[in-house]
Image (cartoon, helix red, strand yellow):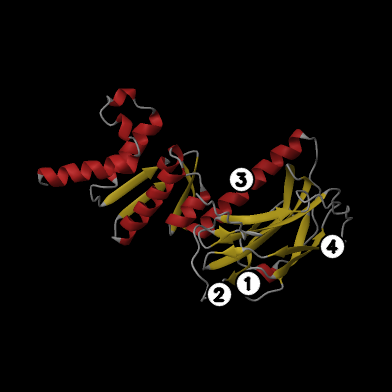
């Protein structure tokens, strides 16, 4: 590189890392986060053939994360091999096609990112559920046999004390401003004293855009005995979403909204797309203003 090209490259790295006020300071005075940000900025701008990113996105603010994500997408489009290490399943889904799940240094699973992440989340929820129940002195009842053919192939996990029978959205296409109903029908496979039913909507990257549940909304669901069915309807006005495909997931849990055990969770059960002619948005979602007031000041 020429002197001018080197100077331009250094300026780009400095701006990317966001440490301009400290660039002339000894690196020993940097925090660990600043060191990682600078290191990522350097390796991401030297045209690497292989890029290894180990939790680098966890040390920066939202602006730095966005710059990193854009740069990684650019490098991947150029054919660069990327090894991305993270506990953030949303980032892994957004960036990776294949995923390796390591547990205490041992390989648990290797395969398509969606499948591996689904198994990882299932195991994490199961482990947390067992610990929570042990802490409370609650013993897991043996669930009845259940049929899950309707959602075969979907990522699904829980302690099997309840079963979701169906998840429905009464619209074929996402219409901003439209009134919609998400209906969840479920069945108790054991005595469920404090049921919680909820849903969330995710984009193609696996990022949760919004969601809620009966506990958070303060709409208690009555206790169900083994074999009883229940239906919960969520009535909502659909917000403006960025163009793309979206997915509705739903869950039945037991407990309180801030401390619960997942009984049955079905990921991406319903798919829906925004209209092809929809205008682009700034960000993921636009919240409509009730009104806009303009005051003219005369000098």
User: From mark 1 to mark 4, how far is it between C-alphas?
Assistant: 28 Å
Q: Residue at x 29, y 47 (%)?
A: 44
User: From mark 1 to mark 2, how far is it between C-alphas?
Assistant: 7 Å
User: Percent x, y for residue 14?
Assistant: 28, 39
Q: Which mark is residue 124?
A: 3
Q: Which residue is mark 2?
A: 275
- On screen, residue 84 versus residue 130, left or right, reads left
User: Percent x, y for residue 257?
Assistant: 75, 45
Does label 1 or label 2 sit earlier along the sequence? 1
* Mark 2: few/some/many CA within 10 Å (<14, 14-19, 20+): some
Q: Which residue is mark 1?
A: 175
Does label 3 or label 1 sit earlier along the sequence? 3
- On screen, residue 199 versus residue 44, left or right, reads right
Q: Residue at x 29, y 60 (%)?
A: 79
Does label 4 or label 2 sit earlier along the sequence? 4
User: Percent x, y for residue 224?
Assistant: 88, 55
Does label 4 or label 3 sit earlier along the sequence? 3
Does label 1 or label 4 sit earlier along the sequence? 1
- On screen, residue 296 versus residue 229, left or right, reads left
Q: Relative to 271, is 139 above or below? A: above
Q: Which mark is residue 230?
A: 4
User: From mark 3 to mark 1, how far is it between C-alphas?
Assistant: 35 Å
């Amino acid at each position: 590189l020429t002197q001018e090209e080197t100077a331009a490259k250094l300026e780009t790295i400095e701006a990317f890392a966001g440490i301009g006020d400290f660039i002339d300071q000894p690196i020993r005075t940097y925090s660990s986060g600043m060191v990682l940000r600078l290191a990522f900025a350097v390796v991401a701008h030297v045209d690497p053939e292989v890029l290894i990113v180990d939790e680098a996105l966890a040390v920066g603010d939202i602006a730095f994360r966005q710059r990193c994500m854009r740069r990684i997408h650019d490098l991947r489009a150029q054919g660069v091999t990327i090894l991305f290490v993270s506990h953030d399943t949303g980032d892994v889904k957004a960036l990776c096609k294949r995923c390796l799940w390591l547990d205490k240094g041992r390989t648990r699973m290797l395969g398509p990112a969606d499948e591996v992440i689904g198994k990882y989340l299932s195991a994490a929820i199961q482990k947390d559920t067992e610990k929570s129940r042990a802490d409370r002195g609650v013993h897991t009842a043996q669930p009845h046999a259940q049929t899950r053919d309707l959602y075969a192939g979907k990522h699904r996990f829980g302690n099997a004390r309840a079963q979701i029978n169906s998840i429905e959205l009464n619209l074929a296409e996402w219409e901003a401003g439209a009134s919609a109903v998400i209906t969840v029908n479920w069945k108790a496979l054991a005595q469920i004293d404090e049921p919680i039913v909820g849903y969330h909507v995710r984009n193609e990257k696996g990022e949760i855009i919004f969601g809620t549940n009966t506990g958070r909304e303060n709409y208690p669901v009555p206790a169900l005995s083994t074999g009883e069915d229940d239906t919960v309807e969520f009535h909502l006005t659909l917000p403006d979403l960025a163009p793309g495909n979206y997915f509705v997931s739903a869950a039945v849990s037991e407990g309180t909204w801030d401390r619960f055990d997942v009984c049955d969770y079905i990921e991406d059960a319903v798919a829906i797309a925004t209209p092809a002619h929809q205008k682009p948005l700034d960000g993921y979602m636009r919240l409509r203003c009730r009104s806009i007031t303009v005051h003219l000041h005369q000098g």
